[in-house]
């Protein structure tokens, strides 16, 4: 016996049985119904981004907002964009452009999935050209304008509420945490290319991984943020080090142990002993004396701990700070003397 499902049942299955690690699918579902109700099949990418952004702003505009994904150490792309917009560090047009550029890489390809099955509803409600346009199918236009569209919207809203409630259970959203996040979001800037810093950093670190002290193989060098960029939102040189891929991947976005902060402070003082232009930048960001710089860096470390909670990475099992060759480098010994 073959079971025939209605278009509305397909839609409900996508909403109810999708695998949701964030609220992106609910927001896109609401956006699709909004666009479909207007009756235009062709949707430019900018219009999609604007409608999607407006839905998130409406959701996150209140004085108390619930988390939009389950990882307590992170904000979603949309949370970050909306917060920056609400705090005035992004104009409306800039925020929409940022949504168009960064927010759809996962949700657009995956929305038409029921459970783990990518084929049951593939192409049923839209086709798309990445970064260009969305084309709504006749099926979506009919669903969005059907007599059931109100109940479908209610279902979406309920599912969104349910996800937020589940995410709240694993988050500790103290006001201080959010205040710290917002400070770094407002004062931060978009990611820049870090590869140009490799030759400069090598001069003060040598061909050794910051985290394990072992030589970095040719072609395996990575520039890493010691304090996670997803909190600090900047690429200042005082927080950048070289690592090989294994340590960089193992550390990921985790908070490093105290011994690495001591090492980072010492590395920065090595730079301050030179006449490189970055010296003035570090001085401006951290302070004019070694004591001030160490105090400022540790304050950032404490702030990140407050935001991220106990999510530590102490380094590779074989790493021993006491035998780290960095601390035997000539310039380090001189600075410590």
Image: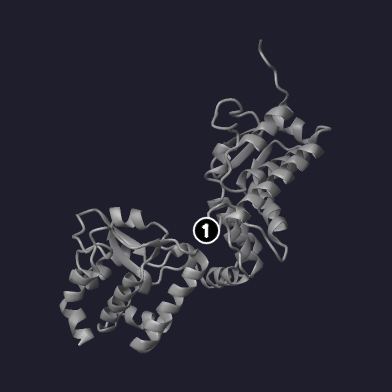
Quadrant for the C terminus in the image: bottom left
Quadrant for the N terminus in the image: top right
Residue 241 occupies which quadrant of the picture?
bottom left
In the picture, measured across the screen, residue 162 lies left or right of residue 317, that is right
How many numbered marks, from 0 up?
Answer: 1
Which residue is at a point 74% across and 40% down the rendered structure image? 155
In the picture, measured across the screen, residue 329 lies left or right of residue 93, that is left
107 relative to 112, above or below: below
In the picture, measured across the screen, residue 11 lies left or right of residue 303, that is right
**Outermost residue toward the top in this view:** 1
Q: Is residue 68 visible?
A: no
Q: Nearer the viewer, residue 28 or 243?
A: 243
Residue 94 occupies which quadrant of the picture?
bottom right
Q: Which colouring convention does the figure follow?
A: one colour
How far across and how far down the image is residue 275, in percent? Answer: 26, 83
**Outermost residue toward the right in this view:** 147
- Circle 1 packing at 10 Å, graded few (<14), some (14-19), many (20+), is some
Helix, strand or loop under label 1? loop
In the picture, measured across the screen, residue 332 lies left or right of residue 30, that is left
Q: Nearer the viewer, residue 319 or 44?
A: 319
How far across and how far down the image is residue 225, in percent? Answer: 38, 65
Q: Is residue 301 visible?
A: yes
Which residue is at a point 41% across and 78% down the rendered structure image? 298
Name the residue that disc number 1 marks: 74
How far across and how far down the image is residue 242, in percent? Answer: 28, 64
243 relative to 157, above or below: below
101 relative to 86, above or below: above
How far across and how far down the image is residue 17, in percent? Answer: 63, 35
Residue 82 occupies which quadrant of the picture?
bottom right
Which residue is at a point 32% across and 81% down the rendered structure image? 279
């Amino acid at each position: 016996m073959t079971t025939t499902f209605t278009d509305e049942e397909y839609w409900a299955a996508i909403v109810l049985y999708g695998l949701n690690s964030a609220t992106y699918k609910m927001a896109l579902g609401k956006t699709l119904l909004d666009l479909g109700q207007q009756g235009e099949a062709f949707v430019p990418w900018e219009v999609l981004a604007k409608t999607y952004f407006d839905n998130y702003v409406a959701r996150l505009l209140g004085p108390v907002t619930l988390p939009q994904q389950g990882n307590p150490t992170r904000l979603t792309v949309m949370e970050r964009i909306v917060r920056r917009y609400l705090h005035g560090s992004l104009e409306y047009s800039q925020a929409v452009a940022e949504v168009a550029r960064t927010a759809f890489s996962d949700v657009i390809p995956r929305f038409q999935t029921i459970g783990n099955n990518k084929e049951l509803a593939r192409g049923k409600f839209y086709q798309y050209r990445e970064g260009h346009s969305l084309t709504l199918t006749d099926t979506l236009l009919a669903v969005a304008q059907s007599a059931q569209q109100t109940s479908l919207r209610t279902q979406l809203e309920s599912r969104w509420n349910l996800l937020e409630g589940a995410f709240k259970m694993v988050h500790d959203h103290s006001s201080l945490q959010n205040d710290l996040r917002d400070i770094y979001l407002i004062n931060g800037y978009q990611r820049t290319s870090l590869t140009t810093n490799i030759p400069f950093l090598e001069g003060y670190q040598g061909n050794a991984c910051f985290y394990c002290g072992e030589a970095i193989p040719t072609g395996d060098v990575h520039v890493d943020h010691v304090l996670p960029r997803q909190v600090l939102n900047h690429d200042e040189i005082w927080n950048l080090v070289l690592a090989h891929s294994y340590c960089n991947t193992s550390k990921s976005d985790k908070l490093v142990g105290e011994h690495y902060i001591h090492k980072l402070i010492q590395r920065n003082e090595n730079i301050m002993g030179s006449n490189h232009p970055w010296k003035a930048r570090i001085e401006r960001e951290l302070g004019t004396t070694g004591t001030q710089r160490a105090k400022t860096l540790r304050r950032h470390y404490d702030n990140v701990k407050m935001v991220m909670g106990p999510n530590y990475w102490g380094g590779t099992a074989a790493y021993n700070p006491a035998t780290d060759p960095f601390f035997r480098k000539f310039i380090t010994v001189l600075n410590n003397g």
